[in-house]
Image (tube, helix red, strand yellow):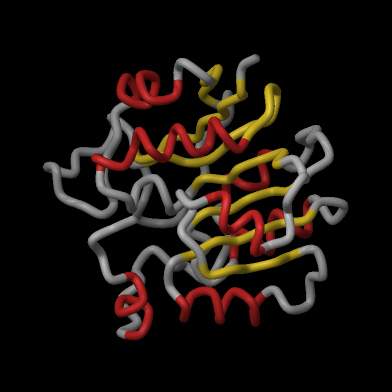
């Protein structure tokens, strides 16, 4: 999925994206009405966001997916007290295999949370990401998250890779209604002005 050796990054403790806390914007979605199903977190890292979603929606199973074995092991430990959380080592794009491995065959996915996956994949994989999410979600289900958009200039270097809002609209617009959230953006210190929170609802 990526040219970056994420396992090595975790083993070398080279993980500046890991703040040891869930993303502050998750709290905005606390009152979200979700259909029955699974909440999926691609690129879940050490599981801080998993904990936040699992505690906000204890009636939902929450699935974390990551390519780095060390991250998966840490996330499993960090979420061991939450019975509705599962974490697996898998490639998000190979959704047939991880749905089978996580015993989610036949279960709907009600929400995909995006925080550290889309910005970490090379831009050449963005269309595959959009197609994967569109295939996973039924009409009305949602992709919500924070994206590095046109308010950040990355000079073409990444990860994280910037993605301007018009490009997001091109990638997702065929299958999703895209909305910016009408709230002040909350983020980690040092990321101010770099992110935009978006809500994407799967169209019929």
The answer to which of 191 and 108 lies nearer the viewer is: 108
Q: Residue at the right extreme?
A: 59
Q: Please tell me whether residue 179 is drawn above or below residue 136 in the rendered image.
A: above
Q: Nearer the viewer, residue 90 or 45?
A: 90
State the image coordinates of residue 185 (x, y, percent, origin top left).
50, 37
* Occupied quadrant, residue 177: top right
Query: On the picture, is 8 further left or further right than 147?
Result: left
On the picture, is 162 further left or further right than 118? left
Q: Looking at the image, which residue is at 54% across and 30% down? A: 134
Residue 47 at x, y percent in the picture:
59, 67
- Judged from this view, the residue extending furthest toward the bottom is 11
- Count of numbered labels shown in the rendering: 0
Residue 67 percent coordinates (x, y): 43, 67
| Residue 153 to residue 12: above or below | above
Name the residue located 34 percent from the left edge and 70 percent from the top edge: 6
Q: Quadrant of the N terminus?
A: bottom left
State left or right for residue 6 relative to residue 103: left
What residue is drawn where x is 37% and y is 78%? 10
The image quadrant that residue 201 belongs to is: top right
Quadrant (top left/top right/bottom left/bottom right) for the C terminus? top right
Which of the pair 17/175 is nearer the observer? Answer: 175
> Which residue is at 32% across, 50% downward?
121
Q: Position of residue 59 (x, y in %)?
A: 87, 52
Query: Is residue 21 positioned above or below 118 on the image?
Result: below
């Amino acid at each position: 999925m990526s040219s970056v050796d994420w396992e090595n990054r975790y083993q070398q403790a080279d993980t500046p994206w890991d703040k040891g806390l869930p993303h502050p914007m998750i709290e905005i979605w606390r009152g979200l009405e979700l259909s029955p199903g699974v909440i999926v977190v691609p690129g879940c890292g050490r599981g801080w966001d998993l904990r936040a979603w699992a505690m906000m929606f204890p009636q939902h199973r929450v699935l974390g997916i990551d390519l780095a074995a060390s991250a998966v092991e840490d996330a499993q430990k960090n979420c061991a007290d939450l019975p509705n959380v599962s974490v697996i080592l898998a490639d998000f794009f190979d959704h047939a295999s991880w749905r089978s491995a996580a015993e989610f065959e036949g279960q709907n996915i009600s929400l995909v949370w995006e925080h550290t996956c889309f910005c970490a994949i090379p831009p050449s994989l963005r269309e595959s990401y959009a197609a994967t999410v569109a295939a996973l979600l039924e009409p009305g289900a949602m992709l919500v998250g924070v994206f590095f958009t046109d308010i950040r200039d990355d000079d073409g270097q990444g990860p994280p890779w910037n993605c301007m809002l018009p490009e997001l609209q091109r990638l997702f617009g065929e299958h999703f209604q895209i909305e910016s959230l009408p709230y002040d953006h909350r983020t980690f210190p040092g990321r101010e002005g770099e992110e935009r929170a978006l809500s994407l609802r799967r169209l019929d």
